[in-house]
Amino acid sequence: MELEKFDAIIFDMDGTLLDTERLSYLAFLEACREHEFENMEKAEAVYRQCIGCNSTRLKQILREGFGKTLPPEFYERWRRIYSRDAYEKAPPVKPGARELLSFLESRNMVMAVATSTKYINAIKKLKSTQLDHYFQTVVGGDQVEKSKPDPEIFQLAISSLQAHPSRCLALEDSNNGTLAAHSAGMFVCQIPDMLPPSEEVKTLVGNRLRIFTSLSAVLEKLKLQS
């Protein structure tokens, strides 16, 4: 965790920098109620699989989870409700995010975002929250073929920064994202948001992976070892 060991830090966005996973969850529940889903326990189980995935993978998970009972317009309705809360006004920033970014900027750290959100929407969120200026590059989920937990999105971000994976630190909230970053060969800090660390993630703790309770805790650790 010594800062000088890293040439770049790559952040996930939703659930890590921005408190938007909760908005997505509430939008999902609203769409379920509108379509009168009867088995909400099943619906929530399907939603948990969606966390950290791009839109292509989301649609696949919905089809696999609900089968023929899935209304054809469900996904678009879910996303419209989410857009109302995440794009029509600036979404909430995670506690400690601005402080961490400011500290890293003061140390001339190269930073990027690798998010499952589409590129154009990621830029909208980062600009509306005035976080965009911290990042040298942003990679969106529509710019890769495979969704997290595949490492492709992190590999693309690393390549765009002309860095080496072993010299990059990833900050992620989701299990899918954490596994993706670890598979890319990065050192990873998971800051769980909607879900606790999975059993698979827990087995990797200590092997280029640490778990923190908040971005503020990450900041304190980096300051302590800098």
Image (tube, grey):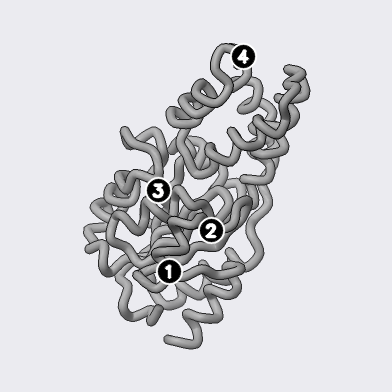
Q: Is residue 130 visible?
A: no
The reply to whether callout 2 and callout 1 are in contact (CB within 8 Å) is yes
Q: In this rendering, is residue 63 above or below 149? A: above
Q: Which residue is mark 2?
A: 197
Question: Type of residue at label 2?
Answer: Pro
Specify the quadrant that holds the C terminus. Answer: bottom left
159 and 199: which one is in front? 199
Q: Quadrant of residue 39?
A: top right
Cα separation between marks 4 and 3: 36 Å
> According to the image, label 1 marks what residue?
205
For the image, the number of numbered tags is: 4
- The residue at the point 69 percent across, 28 percent down is 81
Residue receiving disc 3: 138
Which residue is labeled 4 in the image?
A: 69
Residue 40 drawn at (x, y percent): 72, 30
Q: CA distance from mark 1 to mark 4?
A: 39 Å
